[in-house]
Image (cartoon, rainbow, N blue to C red):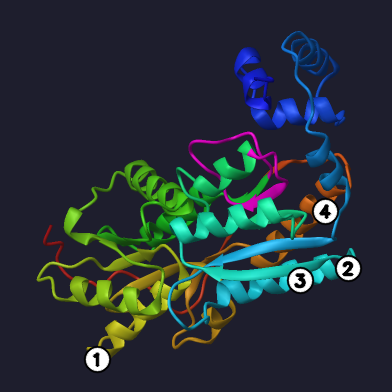
């Protein structure tokens, strides 16, 4: 049986992506590494798949993007802004975008596999990366071009753009502490999502840096929706001993939490301070406007699209992995801690 790319990669202790790019002559692979790969490929009798190579060169000028969403409604402003950035940058570079909406899970991976095998798209943009991401594994295995918005715990050698959640969460916790808050809760997103894991780790570290303890009763889980945020906030508000501030993993859940507070005739920013993450369009139009951690969603969308097109056109990526610093945007949903005895 002829040697495959993953056999060469295992022999040299390199990633499949690096081996593939070395064989293709990409300039971002060092001459020394390329020489090792070529020598090992020759020694192992590696023969490139001529059909695959021919298909790869016959570009359709189409980028694939699968929106991981649940239910019959598509109303998340995060994805609206993301789609605008992808579509505009693709059009600027004379590419079309093929969009599909599939719920995370086996059907989603099957859709990626169908896109890859049919060659209906030249490359993929991946979002909402997971700690152990079957989509990334599939594309690396098949040497299929992609760029992701987000990182993965189990894979590192691929191009991505992401926001530094550690810096953002630290800034948010520091701000709450400066307002006198000592009792801070956290509403996190799904645990399989990489950004949710990183933001939770950031919260734990930021609390420790401020010598604050984390109360397990004040840690909640949500599904990134407004409904999920409202449900979690109601659980918090039912507590006899509740925090004075709540840090939330995304803006939609934060907006749902604000609704729950107001439905109990409490005042956001006084009875409970709330901070979100994303700065989606509606965040500045809530009542009160939402304090949040801004990540440049539109800019990231244009960047991942531009990077993917550079890969498709055999251009060298100057920064194949980019970590951007977010900005804490102060609005009306945060205020001084209530002047009440600390019951913890």
Q: Earlier in the sequence, mark 3 or mark 1?
A: 3
Q: Is residue 186 magenta?
A: no
Question: Do callouts 1 and 2 mark residues in contact (Cβ within 8 Å)?
Answer: no
Q: Earlier in the sequence, mark 1 or mark 2?
A: 2
Q: Residue at x 75, y 68 (%)?
A: 97
Q: Residue at x 84, y 60 (%)?
A: 60
Q: Which residue is mark 3?
A: 87
Q: Earlier in the sequence, mark 2 or mark 3?
A: 3
**In the displayed structure, would residue 285 be above or below residue 81?**
below
Magenta range: 142-159
Residue 344, percent from left and from top: 13, 57
Find numbered disc 2 in the image and state the secondary structure of the residue it sits on.
helix
Seen from the viewer's position, the closer of residues 161 and 166 is 161
Q: Which residue is mark 1?
A: 265
Q: Which residue is mark 4?
A: 309
Q: Which residue is mark 2?
A: 92
Mark 2 → mark 3, Cα distance in angstroms: 9 Å
């Amino acid at each position: 049986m002829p040697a495959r790319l993953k056999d060469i990669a295992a022999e040299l202790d390199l990633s499949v992506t690096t081996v593939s790019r070395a064989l293709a002559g990409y300039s971002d692979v060092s001459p020394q590494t390329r020489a090792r790969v070529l020598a090992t490929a020759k020694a192992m009798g590696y023969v490139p798949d001529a059909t695959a190579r021919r298909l790869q060169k016959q570009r359709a000028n189409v980028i694939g993007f699968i929106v991981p969403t649940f239910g019959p409604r598509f109303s998340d402003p995060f994805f609206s802004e993301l789609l605008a950035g992808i579509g505009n940058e693709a059009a600027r570079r004379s590419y079309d975008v093929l969009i599909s909406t599939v719920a995370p899970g086996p059907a989603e991976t099957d859709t990626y596999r169908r896109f890859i095998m049919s060659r209906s798209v030249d490359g993929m943009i991946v979002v909402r990366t997971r700690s152990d991401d079957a989509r990334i594994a599939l594309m690396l295995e098949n040497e299929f071009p992609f760029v992701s918005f987000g990182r993965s715990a189990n894979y590192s050698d691929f191009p991505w753009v992401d926001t530094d959640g550690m810096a953002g969460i630290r800034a948010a916790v520091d701000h709450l502490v400066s307002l006198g808050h000592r009792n801070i809760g956290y509403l996190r997103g799904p645990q399989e999502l990489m950004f949710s894991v990183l933001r939770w780790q950031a919260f734990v570290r930021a609390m420790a840096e401020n010598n604050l303890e984390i109360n397990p009763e004040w840690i909640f889980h949500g599904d990134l929706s407004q409904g999920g945020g409202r449900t979690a906030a109601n659980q918090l508000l039912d507590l006899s001993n509740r925090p004075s501030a709540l840090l939330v993993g995304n803006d939609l859940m934060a907006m749902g939490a604000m609704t729950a507070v107001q439905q109990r005739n409490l005042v956001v920013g006084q009875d409970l301070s709330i901070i979100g993450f994303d700065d989606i369009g509606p965040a500045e139009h809530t009542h009160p406007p939402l304090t949040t951690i801004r990540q440049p969603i539109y800019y990231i969308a244009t960047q991942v699209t531009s990077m993917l097109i550079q890969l498709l056109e055999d251009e060298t990526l100057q920064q194949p992995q980019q970590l951007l610093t977010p900005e804490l945007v102060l609005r009306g949903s945060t205020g001084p801690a209530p002047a009440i005895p600390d019951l913890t």
